[in-house]
C-alpha cells in the first residue's frame, strides 16, 4: 500500500488525501466512532470519494 497517514487532524488528512489517487473505497479504522463518521462525511463531501467506517469486528477484503 503506497499511501499511509500518520496522526493528523481532519483538515490535514483531507489535504494529504488530495495528493493520492482516488481509491475505490477508503476505510476509516482508527479513532472514536463519531469522529470517524464525521471524517467519512468530509471525505465524501470534499473529495467525492466513497468512505466507510466498518462495524466492530467487520472484515473487508482489500486488494
Image (spheres, helix red, strand yellow):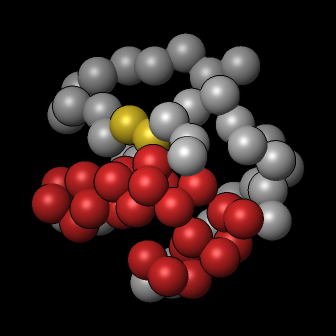
Task: Look at 45% across and 48% down and name the residue there.
Answer: 44
Indicate the position of residue 21 as horizontal and vertical percent values: 82, 47
User: Quick check: can you spot residue 26?
Assistant: no
Task: Look at 65% across and 76% down and name the residue there.
Answer: 15
**Quarter in which the C terminus is drawn:** top right
Does 54 appear above or below 39? above
> In this rendering, would 28 be left or right of 3?
left
Quarter holding residue 56: top left
Task: Look at 51% across and 61% down and name the residue there.
Answer: 46
Is residue 57 or residue 52 the one in the foreground? 52
Does 4 appear above or below 8? above
Does 15 appear above or below 46? below
Indicate the position of residue 5 as horizontal and vertical percent values: 63, 67
Indicate the position of residue 2 as horizontal and vertical percent values: 84, 50
User: Quick check: can you spot residue 14?
Assistant: yes
Task: Look at 30% across and 33% down and name the residue there.
Answer: 54
Is residue 47 or residue 58 the one in the foreground? 47
Amino acid at each position: 500500500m503506497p499511501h499511509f497517514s500518520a496522526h493528523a487532524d481532519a483538515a490535514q488528512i483531507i489535504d494529504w488525501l488530495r495528493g493520492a489517487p482516488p481509491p475505490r473505497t477508503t476505510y476509516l479504522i482508527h479513532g472514536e466512532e463519531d469522529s470517524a463518521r464525521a471524517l467519512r462525511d468530509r471525505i465524501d463531501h470534499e473529495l467525492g470519494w466513497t468512505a466507510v467506517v466498518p462495524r466492530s469486528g467487520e472484515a473487508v477484503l482489500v486488494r
